[in-house]
Image (cartoon, grey):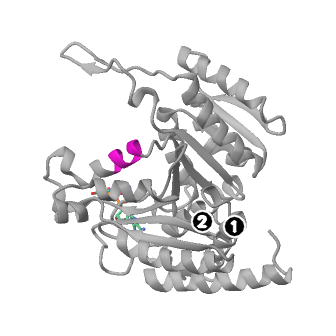
Amino acid sequence: MTHKVALLPGDGIGPEVMNVAVKLMHHIAGKFDVALETSEHPIGGASYDLHNNPLTDETLQACYDSDAVLLGAVGGYKWENLEHHLKPEAALLKLRKSLGLYANIRPAKVYPEFLDSSSLKNEIIEGTDFVVFRELTGGIYFGEPRGIDSEKGWNTMVYSTEEVERITRKAFEAAMHRGKKVTSVDKANVLEVSQFWRNVVERVSKEYPEVKLNHMYVDNAAMQVVRDPRQFDVVVTSNLFGDIISDIAGMITGSLGMLPSASLGEKYALYEPVHGSAPDIAGQNKANPIAMILSVAMMFEYSFKMNKAASLTEEAVGRVLKNGYRTIDINSVDGKLVSTSDFAELVLHQFDEVYNEQALGVFTL
Ligand SMILES: NC(=O)c1ccc[n+]([C@@H]2O[C@H](COP(=O)([O-])OP(=O)(O)OC[C@H]3O[C@@H](n4cnc5c(N)ncnc54)[C@H](O)[C@@H]3O)[C@@H](O)[C@H]2O)c1
């Protein structure tokens, strides 16, 4: 089987983490007899330098022609003073919109090695493993009317049946392969749009009788994520609430260099680390590649249904951390400091180990 992947390395540390993750991606896919046909295209500042345009029609077409898109990061000092629509970051918004990516997915998983670096107590976060499904193309960020004058500012929070149904289905489908529990976060005690959201979620939930659904007001959800994060499996919520909840969830679990994400639409899917282009460390082989590697794992899971490849990749990353290896952003006094490329090599080596153990039945998922 062959899958086509469009690679958009972008700027700063984007190409560095992309290079090592792509090597690993081919290696892992090969183990499962899956071939990946990759093509590389400029985006962001790199594209602006070549074409005076941060996202060309050619790059967009390559994304349309692929089964999945893998993005590094965009932006940097060099392009900071460009007009808004020419800035590298404008490419991201246009790309997400053009591909119709309405579901943003961010896992919140705690690695045992990082229990001590969290601002929360070990006994609270140990074993945390949930995922936030945030609606990405609707809600108050896009609703009309919107505006500002000297007397007031206004925005509109609006959701249609179709918008709520499709993100809810994605969340329930994910829950079927996880802990079979969905928490829908809203503000139905105050907002009509949330009452509507809740009604639609209830209706869609009937299609998944095995999955347990509960509802939570967003203020309570923010509190519960830090009070008892282990209670969550899959969280589904609107654009605004998801923006906040996914950031809280991300930060209880580790550093920025470790957070992957997926954005899914009806036809297309984009995978990218949560971090930016880190111009302060770019070009020095110092960046943490974990967020990028785990974004590849999400691609295996969500786009190619290679769940085992995804979980073995996560296990390999966990073992490298357990062996004490660290990139500069997560290094500690007793950590073994390694470069981006060395860290990725260690993951590749651990992947082979865990793959072989699994084949022999020593390691079970
Ligand atoms: N999705 C994206 O492409 C994206 C997201 C956020 C910011 N940006 C852009 O990136 C540029 C820099 O933004 P910023 O500094 O606010 O955020 P950033 O995420 O690039 O960096 C913040 C800090 O975290 C560190 N860091 C980030 N990722 C790391 C990694 N993988 N390994 C080690 N350290 C890491 C950086 O060195 C920096 O000190 C800006 O141009 C911004 O617009 C792009």
Label 2 packing within 10 angstroms: few (<14), some (14-19), many (20+): many
Q: Is residue 138 above or below residue 267?
A: above
Mark 2–mark 1 Cα distance, whole angstroms, equals 7 Å
Residue sitting at x 69%, y 36%? 183
Residue sitting at x 59%, y 36%? 167
Q: Is residue 58 left or right of residue 355?
A: left
Residue sitting at x 69%, y 75%? 32
Q: Position of residue 6 (x, y in %)?
A: 43, 64
Tell me which image quadrant ligand 1 sits in: bottom left
Residue sitting at x 30%, y 51%? 91
Quadrant in the picture for the N terminus: bottom right
Q: Secondary structure at mark 2?
A: helix
Q: Check residue 202 for magenta coloring.
A: no
Q: Provide the residue span drawn in magenta.
A: 92-98
- The residue that mark 2 highlights is 297
Residue 333 in sight from this viewpoint: no
Q: How many numbered dots are placed on residues in this image?
A: 2
Q: Position of residue 140 (x, y in %)?
A: 42, 27
Q: Kindly check if marks 2 and 1 are in contact, taking CB atoms under 8 A apart as contact.
A: yes
- The residue that mark 1 highlights is 311
